[in-house]
Image: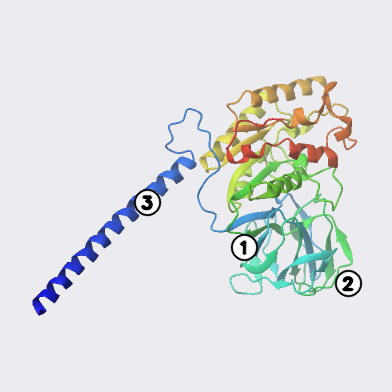
Amino acid sequence: MKTQRAGYGLFAALVALILLISGAIITSLTTLGADDRRQTASGAGTGGRSGKTTARTVGTRGWAGSWSAAPGKAGVAPAGGHSVRNVVHTSIGGSEARITLSNLFGTEPLRIGSASIAVAARGAAASPGSLRRVLFGGRPTATVPAGGHVLGDPVRLAVPADGHLLVSLFVPPPGGGTVTLHPRARQTSYLAAGDHTHEAAASAYTRRISSWHHLTAVDVRNPAARGTVVALGDSLTDGAGSTPDADHRWTDHLADRLRSGRWSYGVVNQGISGNRLLRDGVGPSGLSRLDRDVAGRPGARVVVIALGVNDLLRPAGRANPAEVTAGLRSLAERARARGLRAVGATLMPFRGHPSYSPELDAAREEINTAIRAGGVFDAVVDFDRALRDPYAPERLHPAYDSGDHLHPNDAGYERMARGVDLSVLTGEGEAARL
């Protein structure tokens, strides 16, 4: 009997060994298959003639961008210790949040004495019970190096989709100096003397400002998120001409559409008013912003590029249409190399604007013809056709014109968002259909 039991034991051991080896082989093959899928999704090794990509399928690790604003210019910070309460609008919700602080234009290190995040109630007031302390590497203070940025620790907070957050930062004395900000935010934020970052009440925040200070991103943890759509653009993406504090930029409307459909994506707006594609000016050039403002966003899957009109309009460096088209093509190629799907927007009309001329309009049309012909982007969003006057295609339709004949009004921005075929964002359909 002992010999029989020993035989059974030896047989069981051999079976276990075979199962272990088989499992290792299967795991290796699965891993290789996943690596192959990631490589194909990023556009490498596909053998495709166009090199076009669909949205990447690699995991987001649960993080997606809910809000972002590109650092646009340097400003002068208030003297003395002060708190800034940035009000930001979310696109996608989540169970945790983390913030990014920038000192891109700073000439010396930026000291943060304390920080908090909360769900907004109204104005500068926080929703009861929602205010959370933000730490940096486990510490309540941070120093952001000149030209650099700092990522805050994740904070457990029920972040609402299509809501508002308050991100409050205390800059200790002496204050002053250079501050990195995003001007023309179309959103009211607040300043207070002293440290009031951990107060839910709004009473100390007596000064209103129209720029976001130091803060450049709010990410959320959301396991259901499929990624982040990044809009890289100028004032037409920044929302110039829309109603302040109403969240009527075209990217806000796009986020609304994505939430109401089957696409679970965050949408972040990287528009800078006055920004150019080819040259620095109001903010760094679009060509130089790809890594930091687009590929650097967590879960970035798709970039919608809406740049070029300021390269034509700005007298300091008017570009010819061939230069603009080449710049757009280069930006798209670099985006694909980073695994992003590159969607491009046509340039909208501007007859009636002080800078308009028939020659500039002809240049705009030449750029749009190249964009529509393919070979520049993976897909096209035709903002021009969506907003132009059908009886005078060189100008905006009066129903969509904010009054300056360049920037849309609220209805125009909503029309832009409705002109985006949502399947284009993930590569599930053909070019945008209006």
Residue at 62% from the left image edge and 49% from the top image edge: 228
Quarter residue 138 falls in: bottom right
Asked if the residue under mark 2 is in contact with the one under mark 1, i.e. CB atoms within 8 Å, the reply is no
- Residue 103 to residue 412: above or below: below
Q: In the rendered image, is residue 113 in sight?
A: no
Distance from disc 2 to disc 3, alpha carbons, whole Å, reads 58 Å
Single out the mark in the foreground, 2 or 3.
3
Distance from disc 3 to disc 1, alpha carbons, whole Å, reads 34 Å
Could you say which disc has been placed on residue 151 in the image? 1
- Residue 376 to residue 194: above or below: above
Between residue 170 and residue 67, name the one nearer to us.
67
Q: Which of marks 2 and 3 is nearer the N terminus?
A: 3
> What element does badge 1 sit on?
strand
Residue farthest toward the bottom in the current orientation of the protein:
2
Between residue 212 and residue 10, name the one nearer to us.
10
Q: Could you tell me the amino acid type at mark 3?
A: Thr
Residue at 77% from the left image edge and 39% from the top image edge: 236
> What element does badge 2 sit on?
loop
Q: Can you give x and y, in whole percent of width and height, for residue 67 in the image?
A: 70, 54
Single out the mark in the foreground, 3 or 1.
3
Q: Earlier in the sequence, mark 1 or mark 2?
A: 1
Q: Could you tell me the amino acid type at mark 1?
A: Leu
- Residue 306 to residue 365: above or below: below
Single out the mark in the foreground, 1 or 2.
2
- Residues packed near mark 3 inside 10 Å, few (<14), some (14 to 19) or many (20 plus): few
Residue farthest toward the front in the current orientation of the protein:
1
Could you say which disc has been placed on residue 30 in the image? 3
Q: Can you give x and y, in whole percent of width and height, for residue 334 in the image?
A: 55, 38
According to the picture, the residue beneath numbered tag 2 turns out to be: 203
